Amino acid sequence: MTSVAQHLLWFLPMLWLGMVLAISFLEAPLKFRAPGVTLALGLGIGRIVFRALNICEGILAVLLLISAIVVRPSGATWGWLIGATVVLVLQVAVVRPPLTRRSNRVLAGEDGPRSTAHYWYIGLELLMVVGLIGLAIAAAP
């Protein structure tokens, strides 16, 4: 059991990292450049994709925490894992609600000032990338 948990502790951060890089830094900005994709359509797709990403991230975080409890890794591994988990909680609990309110207003036809919440989300995603790389390195067998 410990061997499986040790491999998960290294593999799952890399899986999570791949998901973040593919969705946040590739799919999200490119979808608005596709022909025929309106702002409303892009926002609708983005909401679905990021909701699914956040659910997957939550599952990965729980699996990583369980693996860490089994393996009892170094303090550095715990630090990176807790850091990545805190970033995820901040994204979901603090930044996503204003983004959702803003997209609700845009989808309802309002035309207001741009939101700075996207910049916070991107900044947290960059921290997530660093955290997941750090976690994978610290947890490597």
Image (cartoon, grey):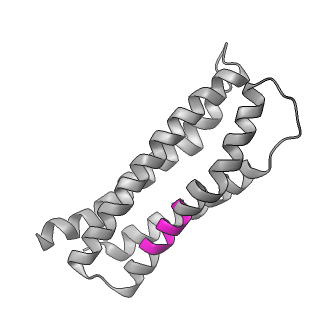
Residue at position x 46%, y 44% in the image: 53
Taking the magenta stretch, the answer to whether it contains residue 77 is: no
Residue at position x 61%, y 27% in the image: 44
Q: Quadrant of the C terminus?
A: bottom left
Determine whether, in the image, residue 87 is placed left or right of residue 52: right
Name the residue nearer the viewer: 137 or 62: 62
Find residue 83 and report its horizontal and vertical position in percent: 50, 72
Name the residue nearer the viewer: 94 or 81: 94
Furthest-bottom residue in view?
Answer: 75
Taken as a whole, is the magenta stretch helix, strand or loop?
helix
Find residue 118 and report its horizontal and vertical position in percent: 72, 48
Residue at position x 71%, y 19% in the image: 38
Query: With respect to residue 117, does 104 lie above or below?
Result: above
Residue at position x 13%, y 70% in the image: 3
Span colored in magenta: 81-88
The answer to which image quadrant residue 63 occupies is bottom left
